[in-house]
Every structure is written in structure tokens, then in C-alpha cells.
Image: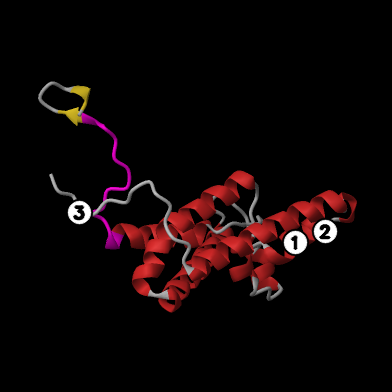
Amino acid sequence: MYRGKTISLSFPPFTPWVKRIIIACTGIYFLQLLIGAVAPGLGLGRFLVTYFALVPGFAIQRGYVWQLLTYSLLHGGMWHLLTNMLTLWMFGSQEEQDWGSRRFIEFYVVCVVGAALVTIAVGYLGWGMDAYTPTLGASGGIYGLLIAFGMLYGDREIFYSRFRWRSRRSTWSAS
């Protein structure tokens, strides 16, 4: 059965904005590690989280509006960074190729800011977090890209396994 184009397991190209976002997030993550290793007693790590991660109470009460964007550049660990950047590379590159760089970065920034506004609303409503719980990572922008990819390229096969479910025998078999 034909299911549209497939994405192979080859590496996608590094498009301009995807490359810039990956370099920025990776560089800032290593800066976080460096600051934490060089001066652990000075509280610089706490400074980074307080001023650049999204803390809904500070963003609203103190006017830290830059947090609506900067939280997406910070990451909580290596695995967090790797999964976000791999997903950005796999799906964002295709979208940037099809949409163009300007439209792609506009969409990504809208997704990041939209996720921040939802996080602020959830923080003030008290659904699982309070207004002073810090949020960081590019996941808000990544989820927006994933939703767009699913809506635009829903007929694409991303991973093909040679094992298929055969309904007649109700067993797994190699094909």
C-alpha cells in the first residue's frame, strides 16, 4: 500500500535557522555547565535560571519579558538537549526547506512564545505547578514544529519496520 513519501534514516541537511538554533542551545548549555563547574558557590547557576528561564511570577510581576524567548535556549541536562536538538534537526529541517528560512523562524518563535504564555497561565492556575516553578528547554517550539509536521506531512512514513502485523493469523511476521 502506498503511503506517500518516506523519510529515510539518512541525515537531513542542516538548514540555516535549524543550525543557528542548535549552535545557540548547545553553546548556552555548555556555558551553563562551565558556570556551574567554575563557580558553584557563587550562585551563578541560580542567576541564570532566575533571569533567563521562564519563571511565570517573575515574568509577570517584575516584567522579565525576555524570558518568553530565553527559556528555550536553556536546557536541564544533556539528554534534554540532545532529544530537543535531534527532533529540531529531523523535523525542522524539512519545514525550513519547504517554507523558507523567514517563515520557519517566525513560526518557531511564535510556538516558543505561545508555549511560554500557556506555561504562565498554567502556573497561575496552579495546575501541577506554581507561579515560581522555572521552565526551560526548547520543547514548546519543538512541539509546535511536530504538530505542523504532522498536519502537513501526515502521509509520510518516518520509520519502517520489517515486522508487520498480519491480521489473518494474528501474529507478528517478518516481511
3 or 1: mark nearer the eye: 3
Residue 95: give x, y in percent of width and height.
38, 65
Q: Label 1 sits on what residue type?
A: Leu
Density class for disc 2 (Cα within 10 Å; few <14, some 14-19, many ≥20) is some
Q: Which mark is residue 48?
A: 1
Q: Residue at x 62, y 57 (%)?
A: 136
Q: Quadrant of residue 4?
A: bottom left
Q: What x and y, as percent, mark residue 56?
A: 63, 64
Q: Are marks 1 and 2 in contact (CB under 8 Å)?
A: yes
Residue appearing at x 47%, y 69% in the figure: 108
Label number found at residue 4: 3
* Residue 60 seen anywhere in this rendered image of the structure: yes
| Disc 1 packing (10 Å; few <14; some 14–19; many ≥20) | some
Horizontal placement of 173 versus 35: left or right? left
Relative to the observer, which residue lies in front, 17 or 132? Answer: 17
User: Residue 24: which quarter of the image?
Assistant: bottom right
Dot 3 or dot 1, earlier in sequence? 3
Q: Residue at x 64, y 57 (%)?
A: 26
Of residues 134 and 78, which is closer to you in this image? Answer: 78
- The amino acid type of the residue labelled 2 equals Leu
Q: Which residues are magenta?
A: 151-164
